[in-house]
C-alpha cells in the first residue's frame, strides 16, 4: 500500500469516531463499505458517504461471508467500521489472511456493552502487493 | 520482538531469507516486527512475557512444489519450520511455534478445493481451505452434502483435523481426524508422500479406503511433527432429509448415571447426533446458597443436590437430543429414545422440540424456536460454519484444557469433585468444575469437560493465575487418568509427559522416529512433546 493511501484511509477514523452523533454524515467517504455494529445504537443509515452501509449486531458471519470474503479476494476494497472490539478482532484476523490490515483504529468515547465490549472505529485496507488496486 | 532461528546469526538468517525469496518470490516472505505480529498467539496466557514463543519469519508457498523447496532450504540452513494452515488454532497456541525463532510456513495460499464428490460423499482439499470455503463450494454447486465443522468455522479442515478437532453432527463425523481419508505429506527431507490408496498410482479410492497396504502412518501427522500435510481427504455426510430435537429431563442427581448409559447406547447405535447435557439448576447459580452448594469442597451428596432441585422445582439434569435422517426415521428414533429412557428412569420427562426438513432456511438457522432454553447452537449442529454462535473473544481470548474421561456418570461426578477441589487454589477464576458441570460428547466415544479461563493482555496477574491453574489441571487430571486431548505449544511438554506408560515408551518411540527422519528438527520440533536429538541435547 502506498503511503498516501494509508494517510487517506487513516484520516477516516477521526470522522468515524464521531459516530454516533451529528458527525455521522459523510463519515464513510472513501470507503467501499462501512460496517455498523448495531449493538452500539441504530440511526439513519443513508447519506454516510460510503458506497454501501452494512449492519450487524455483533456476529459478523453474514457480512463477511456474503460481502467481504468475496470482495477481499479481489484487489482493492477499503472497509471502515464502527463495531465492538470483539467483532474487529474477527474481521482483522480474517483480513490478514487476505493481505489486508487495519490501517487506523480509535477507541470511541461510548460506554462499553455488558462484558466490557468497547466500541472502536477502524479502517481495513489492502496491504499486500497481491491485493493492491 | 525480533528473534533469530536457533544456532543462526543475523547474516545467516539474511542468507536464509534470500533463499526463501528465491523459492516463493519476495512478496511472500515476512520478517518485520509488524508483519510478525500476525503470527503471535493473541490468546496466549504468557503474552508479552519471557515465556511467549515468537517466530522469526513467515513464508507462504503457493503449491506443494514450493513447500518441498522451502523444506529443502530450511534443511540446508538447519532452520525449524512451523507449519500452519489458516492459523486459527486459538486457545491452543494460534499460529505461534514451539521453538523461538522458528519460521512459520503459512499454507494460506494453498486454498483450492480440489474435489467434492457428491455421489461418493468425500472432499479433497488443500490446507488453506477453510470450512467456509468448503461450505461455499458445496452450497454453490447445490450438492446434497453436509459438513461437520468446528465452532467457529474459520479454520481449515486440514488444520483442525490434524489438531484432532471436533464438530457437532453425527458421531463418526464429529471426530475430524477420524473422518479424514488420505493425505499428501511433504517429509522433512522435502520428499512428497501420499498415504493409503494415494500411494498407488492410478488408484481412484484415495478418499474412500484409508489404509492402502501395510502400516498406515497417517496418525503420525496429527499433533505431530513428521511432515507437512499438503492435501487431505475427508468423508462427508450425505445431507440428511430431516432434523428433529427433543429434551429429556431426569429428576435426581444419581439419575445421571442411567441417563448417560442410555445416551451412549443411542450414540453408539448411530441413532442420534451431538447431544447437549445440562442442568436446569444452573439457572439458580446466582443464588449464593446454590453456588455454595455446588462448589462445596469434597463435592455434593445425592441428597443435597436432590433437595436443592426439589426446592427450586427443577430436575437435576437434562439432555438435548438431535436426530438427523429421513423424517420417519428421525421420528421413530425420537420415540424410541423417549420410551427407552422414560421407561427406565422414574420421573423422567420428555419434550418434543423443533423439527423441519433440510437444508434449513436462513430463518430456521437464525431463530431457533425451541420450547425450552436450549444450549444447541443451530448452525454448527447442521454443519453450517459460523463466526458468532460461539463467542470467540471473551476479554482478549482464552486457553483451553479439555480432559478426556469415560462416558460414565460416576466418572463425571468424580471429575466435578476432584478438579473442583483442585481449582479452589485459584479463587478468582470461575468455577469451571462444579457439581452442575456436565460433559461434552464431541468426540465419538469419550466425554470431555471444559476448563477455559480468559486472557487479558493488560492484566498479567490474571494471566499468570490462568497459566498456573492450567498447569495444575494437567497434573491433577493425570493423577486420575484423565488426559488433555490437545494443547498449546507452551503446555505440550507437560501434557505429553503425562502419557508416561512404561517409562515414557510412547515418547521414546516418537523420538526414535524423529531422530531417524528429522534429526535437525526441521519440521516443528517440540510439537506434540516430540523433540529431535538436536533439541534434546
Image (cartoon, rainbow, N blue to C red):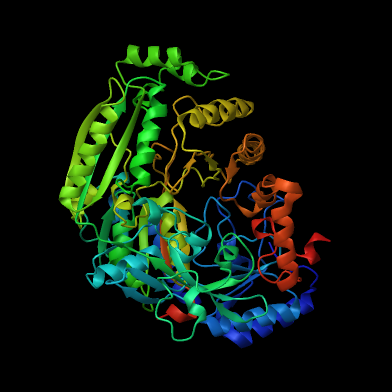
Residue sitting at x 80%, y 73%: B9
Left or right of residue B39: residue B468: right
Rendered location of residue B498, percent (x, y): 68, 44
- Assign the C terminus of chain B to one quadrant of the image: bottom right
Rendered location of residue B283, percent (x, y): 35, 25
Rendered location of residue B64, percent (x, y): 53, 81
Q: Is residue B17 visible?
A: no
Residue sitting at x 60%, y 52%: B488
Residue sitting at x 60%, y 86%: B23
Q: Residue furthest front?
A: B214
Rendered location of residue B370, percent (x, y): 21, 38
Q: Quadrant of residue B179?
A: bottom left
Left or right of residue B46: residue B87: left
Pick the front one: A87 or B535: B535
Pick the front one: A14 or B480: B480
Q: Is residue B112 above or below residue B330?
A: below
Residue sitting at x 34%, y 57%: B385
Q: Is residue B286 visible?
A: yes
Amino acid at each position: 500500500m502506498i503511503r498516501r493511501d494509508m494517510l487517506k484511509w487513516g484520516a477516516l477514523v477521526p470522522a468515524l469516531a464521531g459516530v454516533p452523533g451529528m458527525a455521522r454524515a459523510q463519515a464513510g467517504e472513501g470507503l467501499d463499505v462501512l460496517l455498523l455494529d448495531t449493538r452500539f445504537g441504530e440511526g439513519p443509515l443513508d447519506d454516510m458517504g460510503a458506497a454501501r452501509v452494512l449492519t450487524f449486531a455483533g456476529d459478523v458471519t453474514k457480512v463477511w461471508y456474503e460481502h467481504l470474503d468475496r470482495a477481499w479476494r479481489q484487489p482493492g476494497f477499503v472497509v471502515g467500521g464502527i463495531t465492538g472490539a470483539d467483532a474487529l478482532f474477527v474481521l482483522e484476523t480474517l483480513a490478514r489472511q487476505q493481505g489486508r490490515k487495519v490501517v487506523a483504529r480509535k477507541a470511541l468515547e461510548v460506554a462499553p456493552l455488558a462484558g466490557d465490549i468497547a466500541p472502536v472505529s477502524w479502517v481495513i485496507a489492502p496491504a499486500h502487493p497481491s491485493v493492491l488496486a | 520482538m525480533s528473534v533469530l532461528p536457533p544456532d543462526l546469526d543475523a547474516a545467516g538468517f539474511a542468507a536464509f531469507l534470500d533463499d526463501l525469496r528465491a523459492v516463493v518470490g519476495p512478496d511472500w516472505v515476512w520478517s518485520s516486527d509488524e508483519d510478525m505480529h500476525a503470527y503471535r498467539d493473541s490468546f496466549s496466557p504468557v503474552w508479552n512475557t519471557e515465556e511467549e514463543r515468537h517466530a522469526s519469519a513467515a513464508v507462504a508457498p503457493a503449491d506443494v512444489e514450493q513447500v518441498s523447496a522451502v523444506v529443502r532450504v530450511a534443511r540446508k540452513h538447519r532452520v525449524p519450520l512451523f507449519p500452519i494452515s489458516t492459523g486459527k488454532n486459538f486457545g491452543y497456541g494460534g499460529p505461534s511455534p514451539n521453538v523461538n525463532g522458528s519460521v512459520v510456513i503459512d499454507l494460506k495460499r494453498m486454498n483450492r478445493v480440489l474435489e467434492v464428490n457428491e455421489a461418493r460423499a468425500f472432499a479433497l482439499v488443500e490446507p488453506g481451505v477453510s470450512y467456509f470455503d468448503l461450505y461455499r463450494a458445496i452450497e454453490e454447486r447445490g450438492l446434497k452434502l453436509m459438513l461437520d465443522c468446528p465452532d467457529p468455522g474459520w479454520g481449515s479442515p486440514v488444520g483442525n483435523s490434524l489438531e484432532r478437532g471436533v464438530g457437532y453432527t453425527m458421531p463418526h463425523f464429529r471426530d475430524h481426524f477420524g473422518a479424514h481419508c488420505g493425505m499428501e505429506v511433504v517429509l522433512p527431507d522435502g520428499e512428497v508422500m501420499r498415504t493409503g490408496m494415494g500411494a498407488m498410482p492410478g488408484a481412484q479410492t484415495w478418499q474412500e479406503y484409508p489404509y492402502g497396504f501395510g502400516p498406515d502412518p497417517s496418525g503420525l501427522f496429527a499433533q505431530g511433527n513428521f511432515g507437512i500435510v499438503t492435501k487431505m481427504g475427508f468423508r462427508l455426510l450425505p445431507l440428511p432429509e430431516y432434523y428433529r430435537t427433543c429434551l429429556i429431563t431426569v429428576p435426581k442427581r444419581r439419575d445421571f448415571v442411567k441417563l448417560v448409559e442410555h445416551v451412549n447406547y443411542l450414540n453408539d447405535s448411530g441413532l442420534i447426533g451431538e447431544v447437549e447435557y445440562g442442568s436446569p439448576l444452573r439457572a439458580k447459580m446466582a443464588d449464593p446458597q446454590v453456588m455454595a452448594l455446588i462448589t462445596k469442597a469434597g463435592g455434593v451428596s445425592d441428597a443435597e443436590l436432590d433437595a436443592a432441585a426439589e426446592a427450586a422445582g427443577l430436575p437435576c439434569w437434562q439432555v438435548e437430543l438431535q436426530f438427523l435422517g429421513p423424517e420417519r426415521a428421525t421420528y421413530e428414533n425420537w420415540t424410541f429414545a423417549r420410551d427407552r429412557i422414560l421407561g427406565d428412569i422414574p420421573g423422567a420427562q420428555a419434550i418434543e422440540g423443533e423439527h423441519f426438513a433440510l437444508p434449513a432456511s436462513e430463518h430456521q438457522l437464525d431463530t431457533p424456536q425451541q420450547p425450552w432454553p436450549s444450549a444447541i447452537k443451530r448452525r454448527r449442529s447442521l454443519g453450517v460454519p459460523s463466526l458468532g454462535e460461539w463467542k470467540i473473544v471473551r476479554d482478549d481470548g482464552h486457553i483451553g484444557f479439555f480432559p478426556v474421561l469415560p462416558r460414565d456418570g460416576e466418572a463425571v461426578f468424580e471429575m466435578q469433585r476432584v478438579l473442583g477441589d483442585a481449582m479452589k487454589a485459584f479463587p478468582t477464576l470461575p468455577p469451571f468444575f462444579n457439581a452442575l458441570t456436565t460433559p461434552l460428547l464431541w468426540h465419538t466415544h469419550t466425554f470431555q469437560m471444559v476448563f477455559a479461563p480468559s486472557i487479558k493482555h493488560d492484566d498479567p496477574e490474571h494471566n499468570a493465575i490462568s497459566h498456573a491453574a492450567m498447569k495444575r489441571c494437567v497434573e491433577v487430571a493425570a493423577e486420575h487418568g484423565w488426559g488433555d486431548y490437545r494443547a498449546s505449544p507452551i503446555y505440550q511438554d507437560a501434557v505429553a509427559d503425562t502419557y508416561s506408560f512404561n517409562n515414557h515408551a510412547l515418547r521414546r518411540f516418537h523420538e526414535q522416529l524423529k531422530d531417524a527422519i528429522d534429526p535437525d528438527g526441521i519440521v516443528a520440533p517440540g510439537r506434540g512433546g516430540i523433540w529431535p536429538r538436536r533439541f534434546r541435547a
